[in-house]
Image: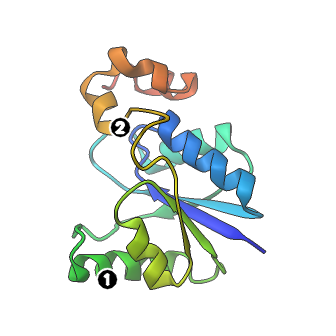
Amino acid sequence: MKIGFTIGKFAPLHKGHQYLIEKGLKEMDEFYVIVYDTNVIDISTEQRAKWIKEIYPKAKIIYAKNPPSQYGLDEKSVKIQTDYLKKLVKEIPVTHFYNSEPYGKFVARDLDIQEVQVDRNREKYMISATKLRNNLEENKKYLNNIVYEDIKEII
């Protein structure tokens, strides 16, 4: 059985995230989306997870509450983050990690699973959550309407 997962803040969820989730749902028997706590947007983790569940009812959600604050690609930071992920998926026999970030190879290595890179160069969707937060109206075409309606008054 192929069981994949991805991680993110989804702050906000955009078409690039959706492309990655859709690929995982299509290719895996089960697909998990780990939604991280964050303070970069004034939308709760539960609300961001709700967007994913509304758009992708087959996606399984895991909440990443109080994640480690240390980030980076150095071995110490990678170990802190991957140890945290191991705890989150410890009961799930994951086989694949879907991502579009440089840290993906470390997650796959440390969990001893296969990495699946999805549009790492942002060729399909030239968007990031930061770009959306910085200029929502200019970039709203990258948002599902349910996401846009929730954030248009906040950002």
Residue 77 shows in the view:
yes
Closer to the N terminus: mark 1 or mark 2? 1
Residue 23 percent across, percent down from the top left: 64, 49
Depth check: give the residue in front, 44 or 70: 70
Measured in 3D between alpha carbons, the distance from the residue under mark 1 to the one under mark 2, in whole angstroms, is: 25 Å
Horizontal and vertical percent for residue 68?
Answer: 29, 71
Q: In the image, is residue 121 above or below residue 138?
A: below
On the image, the x and y values in percent for residue 147 come to 50, 29
Residue type at mark 2 is Ser
Q: Residue at x 31, y 82 (%)?
A: 79
Number of the label disc, if any, that sits on residue 79: 1
Q: Which amino acid does label 1 sit on?
A: Lys
Compare residues 68 and 25 and report the one nearer the observer. Answer: 25
Numbered tag placed on residue 69 in the rendering: none
Dot 2 corresponds to which residue?
128
Question: In the shown orientation, is residue 80 left or right of residue 44?
Answer: left
